[in-house]
Image (cartoon, grey):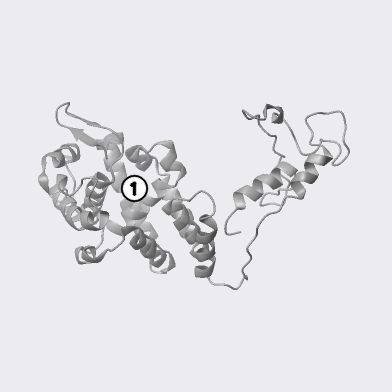
């Protein structure tokens, strides 16, 4: 399945025919009441004792309801097993335009599962690191849209990027996707090195700033406020990651994070109207400069 796996699995589990990885049937689902159909509360596809025979139990679907569902048509596009990953991904994108659009990272996750499932699982486990989740402090919606995985991926792509490569980024979303494909397909990618750098960076930030790591600093109230800011993540996370990778200690993180809001080198390039392709070539080198003052370990 390229798209629709969760929906079909839900239908199958409701009907009592979905099996787990060990081939054992999962417990059938029960319906919940809705505002317009409160009568659905507790409804099941079949009784515990008999699959098909109707009885006096009002919580079991009638044969008419079962036929209505079974006769409903599903549009299915089939491609050959031998088709390459690009064809599968192109189909996935086309299918996705017909319903609610997925976030960019949800689409990338589809690519990762097709290219390198191990890399996908690794990236997901990285994004679940407690210190990292504490620092980014995202609300429920971006978490549901896999934005935490996107931010982890961006750390891997941009924290050690060559500054010469920053001048020709083009569309940053496309650049992230292409670099992800390149990394996930590489047999030389150093998982342990990147995992250590990632965890060292966010363990340090969690100890210094916790959930204030990527929030705006209010000079009048002398504290960090508001929600997550991508531009601050790009300066602080990438800057610290780059410094740690090059063997430097990073001191005074909280003071430096607050000070960037008084520095025009940051504020002029971090506004909401600034595109990422224009912003990154300026603030990534800036972040490296801000957080590279410590002694070399």
Q: How many marks?
A: 1
Q: Residue 181 in the image: x percent, y percent?
A: 41, 65
Query: Above or below — where is 116 with respect to 105?
Result: below
From the image, which quarter does the N terminus lie in?
Answer: bottom right
- Is 174 placed left or right of 246 in the picture? right
Along the viewing direction, whichever of 244 and 80 lies nearer the viewer: 80
Q: Residue at x 40, y 44 (%)?
A: 129
**In which quadrant of the rendered view does residue 267 lie?**
top left
- Is 244 placed left or right of 191 in the picture? left
Query: Is residue 294 visible to the viewer in this orientation of the structure?
Result: no
Query: Above or below — where is 89 with respect to 230?
Result: below
- Is 224 placed left or right of 24 in the picture? left
Q: Residue at x 48, y 61 (%)?
A: 111
Query: Is residue 259 visible to the viewer in this orientation of the structure?
Result: yes
Q: Residue 82 in the image: x percent, y percent?
A: 60, 73
Q: Residue 25 in the image: x percent, y percent?
A: 73, 46
- Is 74 placed left or right of 135 in the picture? right
Query: Above or below — where is 36 with respect to 239?
Result: above
Q: Secondary structure at mark 1?
A: helix
Query: Above or below — where is 94 with respect to 224?
Result: below
Q: Residue at x 35, y 49 (%)?
A: 151
Along the viewing direction, whichever of 270 and 155 lies nearer the viewer: 270
Q: Residue at x 69, y 46 (%)?
A: 11
**In which quadrant of the rendered view does residue 194 lie?**
bottom left
Instruction: Kindly identify which residue carries mark 1.
Output: 199
Query: Alpha-carbon neighbours of circle 1 within 10 Å: few (<14), some, or many (≥20)?
Result: some
Q: Residue 189 in the image: x percent, y percent?
A: 38, 65
């Amino acid at each position: 399945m390229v798209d629709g796996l969760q929906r079909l699995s839900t239908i199958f589990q409701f009907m009592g025919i979905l099996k787990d990885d060990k081939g054992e049937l999962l417990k059938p689902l029960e319906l919940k009441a809705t505002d317009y159909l409160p009568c659905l509360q507790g409804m099941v596809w079949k009784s515990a004792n008999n699959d098909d025979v109707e009885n006096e139990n009002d919580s079991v679907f009638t044969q008419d309801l079962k036929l209505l569902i079974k006769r409903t048509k599903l549009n299915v596009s089939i491609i050959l097993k031998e088709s390459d990953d690009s064809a599968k991904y192109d189909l996935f994108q086309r299918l996705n335009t017909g319903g609610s659009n997925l976030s960019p990272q949800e689409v990338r996750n589809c690519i990762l599962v097709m290219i390198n499932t191990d890399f996908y699982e690794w990236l997901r486990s990285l994004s679940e690191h407690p210190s990292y989740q504490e620092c980014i402090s995202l609300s429920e919606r971006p978490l549901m849209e896999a934005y935490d995985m996107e931010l982890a991926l961006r750390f891997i792509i941009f924290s050690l990027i060559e500054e010469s490569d920053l001048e020709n980024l083009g569309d940053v979303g496309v650049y992230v996707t292409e670099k992800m494909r390149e990394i996930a397909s590489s047999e030389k990618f150093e998982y342990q090195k990147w995992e250590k750098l990632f965890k060292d960076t966010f363990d340090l930030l969690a100890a210094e700033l916790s959930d204030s790591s990527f929030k705006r600093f209010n000079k009048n109230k002398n504290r960090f406020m508001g929600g997550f800011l991508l531009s601050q993540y790009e300066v602080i996370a990438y800057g610290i990651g780059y410094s740690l990778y090059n063997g430097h200690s990073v001191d005074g993180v909280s003071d430096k994070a607050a000070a960037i809001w008084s520095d025009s080198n940051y504020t002029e390039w971090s506004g909401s109207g600034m595109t990422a392709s224009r912003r990154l070539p300026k603030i990534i080198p800036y972040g490296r400069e801000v957080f590279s003052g410590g002694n070399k370990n």
